[in-house]
Amino acid sequence: MNFSDRKFYKLALLALAIVCLFGVAQAQRRLNGQRARYGLVHDTELKGAPPVLQFTTVALGGFRGLIANILWVRATELQDEDKFFEMVQLADWITKLEPRFVQVWFVQAWNMAYNISVKFPEASDRWRWVQRGTELLRDEGLKYNPDEPLIYRELAWFFQHKMGANLDDAHMYYKAAWVKEMQQVLGEAGRPNWDELINPATSEEKNRSALLRDKYKMNPRKMKEVDERYGPLEWRLPEAHAIYWASLGLDKTKGQKDLIVLRRVIYQSMQLAFQRGRLVHARIGEGEILFLQNLDIIPKTSAAYEEAIEQDVENRDHIRRAHRNFLLDAIYFLYVNNRMRDAAHWYQYLRETYPDAMLARNPDGSYNRQRPPLTLEEYALSRYGVDITETDQNRVKAMITGLFVNAFSSLLLGEDESAHAHERMAQRVYELYEEKTDLRSSKTQEKRLTLGPLVDLRRLALNDMLGPQKGLQPEPAAQLRKLLNLPSPTNAPPTNAPAPKP
């Protein structure tokens, strides 16, 4: 073949290649149209994606899926071998190749927050990996999959379970670290000023609003909506954020299954928020946090359970059992916090909704339908560990002094109503005991069975709290003396102090 023939041959091949490319382009266009028409592919446009992700999307084309599958198989093998650190890089490559592959976001984030974090003994190191897992879902997973409800569910679960629950040894550190971060945005009051966050006016308000939106990807207008529907919530604690992300996921639900899973996160997180959703005291540097119940969300928590019972037919019995237990807790805590009207309301609601709830039990655990249901007072005292039939003198004394100790502790926390309720409960236990011993004892037995004056039992509990051996530290001891108008220990020993006024 001479030179001219070779030149013609090359030109012919070039022309053929151009024709083939043109034909492939036309066929690809038709195939893409059919795939979109039949819903066989997600939108592949990745707005705001980094250059490396845009490059792999365009350059590799259909081979991205094949490469991602190979890497996924290898990542799964590494996970089975507990080689979590090696798996991090592979998972990162997979998310760059197939950013809409939802499962890999779950696995990568879970790997960081659960598997890798526990490899470190220091709580601060663990927290960094928990943060990385949370940020991966929130900052990247939702960026490329904004309408995927299961990513919202997974993110909410991290707040509910990893940060909010107590299964990780470092859970108090996580809570304290999150409180510190949220206080920079929301302040230390616990109740955000929604108007300042939604429509900031000053430079300081604008900075906090921007931090909330840009770093934490949270919309203050949506937060306010969630708070009005499920709150009032303590937004420095993880449970409020679990409810927020689950609520966002509800807006993206694609079916009944997604709806049920997200509803479950909401009512479970509200249950936790009820149990310890009020932040009383926090020493951030020491990881020390003191919680109390958030009694104000009881009606909305009950409503969340009722909504879940109606929607989740398959798990209805389990949810009803959880709802019943929640109501039992709610009634007790309302009672001991002296919110008697609310306690009576929910007691009546419980009796109507779950008729067996207040029945006494036989030794074998079956309901005793021969006895009348427990009264509100009998139930509250039994929950505290007080057996209304108890006549052992020493046991009843321990119950009463324990109630007084709780009253003084509540007083120190500024919980005056709770303090008064515990004092009232102590008095009621004393009266019940006196009534029973009067009926059962003869005159010769009265002296042996009597508890002595109630004021002496109160003084005994107070002396235990103020005593130098096992009592309070000097600062809270001085504060309690001041609240009870007691003289300093150098002047005189504690005497009968007045009870806090209701």
Image (cartoon, grey):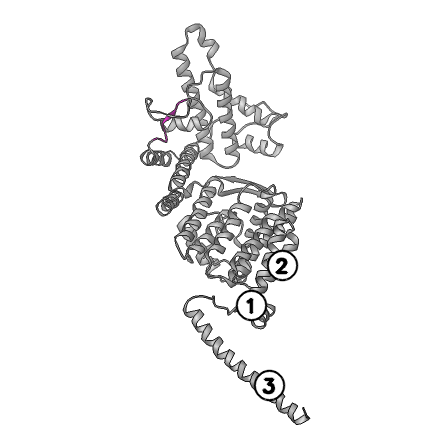
The magenta-colored residue range is: 356-362
Residue at left offset 62%, top offset 53%: 77
Q: Position of residue 379 (x, y in %)?
A: 40, 28
**Circle 2 residue:** 90
User: Dot 2, how many residues are within 10 Å of its Cα: few (below 14), some (14-19), or many (20+)?
Assistant: some
User: Which amino acid lies under the numbered mark 1 shown in the image of this protein?
Assistant: Ala
Q: Position of residue 452 (x, y in %)?
A: 48, 15
User: Which amino acid lies under the numbered mark 3 shown in the image of this protein?
Assistant: Leu
Spatial CA distance of label 1 from label 3 is 38 Å
Viewer-nearest residue: 110 or 270: 110
Spatial CA distance of label 3 from label 2 is 40 Å
Q: Position of residue 331 (x, y in %)?
A: 40, 34
User: Which amino acid lies under the numbered mark 2 shown in the image of this protein?
Assistant: Leu
Q: Is residue 360 visible?
A: yes
Q: Earlier in the sequence, mark 1 or mark 3?
A: 3
State which mark lies toward you, 2 or 1: 2
State which mark lies toward you, 1 or 3: 3
Helix, strand or loop at mark 3: helix
**Circle 3 residue:** 13
Which residue is situated farthest in the bottom direction here?
Answer: 4
- Label the magenta part by its dominant secondary structure: loop
Q: Position of residue 22 (x, y in %)?
A: 52, 82
In the depicted structure, whether residue 197 falls above or below residue 157? below
* Left or right for 183, reference 225: right
Helix, strand or loop at mark 2: helix
